[in-house]
Amino acid sequence: MPDLSTQYLGLTLKNPIVPSSTPLTRDADAPLHLEDAGAAAIVMHSLFEEDVRNDERMIDRFLIHPEAFGEASSHLPARQEYESKLDRYLAQIGYLKNRLDIPVIASLNGDSLSGWVELGRELEGAGADALELNAWHLPGSPSETGSGIEDRYIALLSELKNVVGIPICLKLSPFFSSLPNFVRRAEEAGTAGVSLFNRFFQPDIDLATLNVVDRVQLSTSADGLLAMRWIAILRGQTPITLAASGGIHTAGDALKMLLAGADVTHVASSILLNGPGRITQMLADLQAWLNEREYGSIEQLKGSMSQRNHPNPSAFARSAYLNAIDSFTPPAGVRY
């Protein structure tokens, strides 16, 4: 049987299928079912900066300075009895580490420097094997520059790296003017890997109510093509882990990412739609494909179709855009 093992952030995983950050890890049993289905590691749901800050403000208002509320203060819980979102997150890390045999990767989501060093220490202390730093800042002001935002991310990564011993993976958006340059800067700042790409949920407008609404929009296989292209370009330019995230629904999707140069493939929407059994099916299909083509291991195929190794490197460059446009043929019966 082909060897499916791969390296991820310095960790040896039994295969390249890793459930990414979803609400599933808040549940006590869902991660256990994911491991039983064949998941090689678990990325926990994100601990959001906003949630931590809101908890801090509430503790300060009601538990540290309750005098302003008079007699009502006697009905407030004691500070030591209040369980914050951070407390629950740390407890869940401990629970999963005790129950799972696969690595548990914590996820931080935020973009400010304040407090993240302390949070990183606590997550490491709770037993996390690695840390995914999901840094995203929405630049709504014309006074903000791209270089300034990149500097913010690098500063956050550097501060965490100085105090955290576990490997850090930086989960990136596709919105960089020069992604290879930023990845090199992140590598120099100490990241063990990058995950491409963060998938954002966009606000929508309800035409019936004229309200702005938030809707979860799950991915499709086509959503992974952007990550595949950039992984193919980055493979061979950096020694750090390359993780593919978004649009991976089948073994075929995962194989494309691996051929392009990914070390692991993160799966989310497919699990949410089909349950943990989708991982089992993907692994079986992956084994069958490798057997049919007489591959001995994942390592043997990894990056074999990256830009550096492809006989036609322009397949991932600007010329591919022109070729795609020229190759389009309207459906039969459609007239313009």
Image (spheres, grey):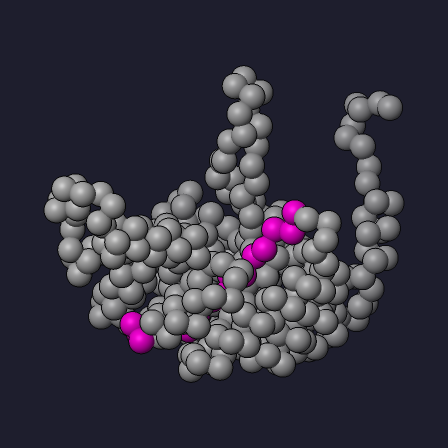
Foreground pick, 198 / 231: 198
Residue 232: image location, x then y, percent: 68, 67
Q: Residue at x 42, y 43 (%)?
A: 273
Q: Residue at x 50, y 42 (%)?
A: 218
Name the side, left or right, on which 165 lies relative to 234. left
Q: How many marks?
A: 0
Q: Residue at x 86, y 50 (%)?
A: 322
Q: Residue at x 72, y 65 (%)?
A: 147
Residue 141: image location, x then y, percent: 68, 48
State whether residue 306 is above or below residue 328: below
**Is residue 185 one of those drawn in magenta?**
no
Residue 100: image location, x then y, percent: 27, 68
Name the side, left or right, on which 266 lies relative to 179. left
State whether residue 41 is above or below residue 11: above
Q: Check the picture and name the quadrant holding the C terminus.
A: top right
Q: Quadrant of residue 20?
A: bottom left
Whether residue 128 is visible here, answered yes or no, is no
Q: Magenta stretch: give its range.
A: 125-140
Report the residue that reaches farthest toward the top. 208
State whether residue 189 is above or below residue 274: below
Name the side, left or right, on which 274 lies relative to 74. right
Whether residue 90 is visible here, answered yes or no, is yes
Foreground pick, 53 / 133: 53
Q: Quadrant of residue 202?
A: top right
State whether residue 86 is above or below residue 123: above
Residue 45: image location, x then y, percent: 39, 56
**Is residue 129 one of those drawn in magenta?**
yes
Q: Check the picture and name the quadrant holding the N terminus.
A: bottom left
